[in-house]
Amino acid sequence: MKPALLILDPQNDFFGDDNPNLAEFQTAVPTINAAIALFRQRRWPLVFVQHSSTKKPAGSYAWAIHEQFDCRPDDTRLSKRHYNAFWETELDALLQADGVDLVAVSGYVAEFCVLSTARGAQERGFRSAILAEGIAGMNGRYTQFTLELSPRITLAELEASSR
């Protein structure tokens, strides 16, 4: 198994006081950072995916990756304009070139971006799983719904997968 970790929408826009589910977004950060550390240690690919829109134009403060995430200058980054990070991006080709067969999806807006990207991975022939405790939606019910509806993988399962 060669997994890739996608970190969807880890952007400043979601860490403001106007986020109705901010506590859940913050709770997911340590799990995501632990997954990032594991993927770096194993030399597995990881991709930070940033959503661009009129509200979050590329290069703006709202678009930038939030400081709580362990994102480094040499990390792979991808900009998307749709919920599905595969749609009209080079993500599929990037993962294919790296020999990835499992896409572990983490990040934000579970009910839209996380779910759409996980399904987009499946549609392109990858196995996909959502990182348990590594996602959040705009409402806790949406996060639970996404987890109930989708294949999941825990950090411990990822750690055990290459021993």
Image (cartoon, rainbow, N blue to C red):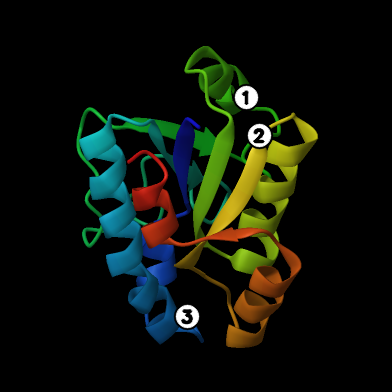
Q: Which of label 1 and label 3 is nearer to you?
A: 1
Contact check, label 2 and label 3, Cβ < 8 Å = no
Which residue shows up at 68% across the image and 38% down it?
Answer: 121
Vertical placement of 97 versus 103: above or below?
A: above
Residue indicated by mark 2: 86
Of marks 1 and 2, which one's residue comes earlier in the chain?
A: 2
Q: Quadrant of the C terminus?
A: top left
Question: Given the current orientation, which residue lies at the most extreme front position?
Answer: 163
What separation in Å lies between label 1 and label 2 (alpha carbons)? 6 Å
Q: Which of label 2 and label 3 is nearer to you?
A: 2
Circle 1 crowding by C-alpha within 10 Å: few under 14, some 14–19, many from 20: some
Residue 128's x, y, as percent? Answer: 63, 45
Which residue shows up at 47% across the image and 18% down it?
Answer: 98
What separation in Å lies between label 2 and label 3 (alpha carbons)? 26 Å
For the residue pair 30 and 113, the one nearer the viewer reads as 30
Q: Is residue 83 visible?
A: no
Of marks 2 and 3, which one's residue comes earlier in the chain?
A: 3
- The quadrant where residue 74 appears: top left
At label 1, the amino acid type is: Asp
Residue indicated by mark 3: 19
Left or right, 66 with respect to 79, comes to left
Residue 99's x, y, as percent? Answer: 52, 18
Question: Given the current orientation, which residue lies at the most extreme top position?
Answer: 97
Which residue shows up at 56% across the image and 40% down it?
Answer: 103
For the residue pair 83 and 124, the one nearer the viewer reads as 124
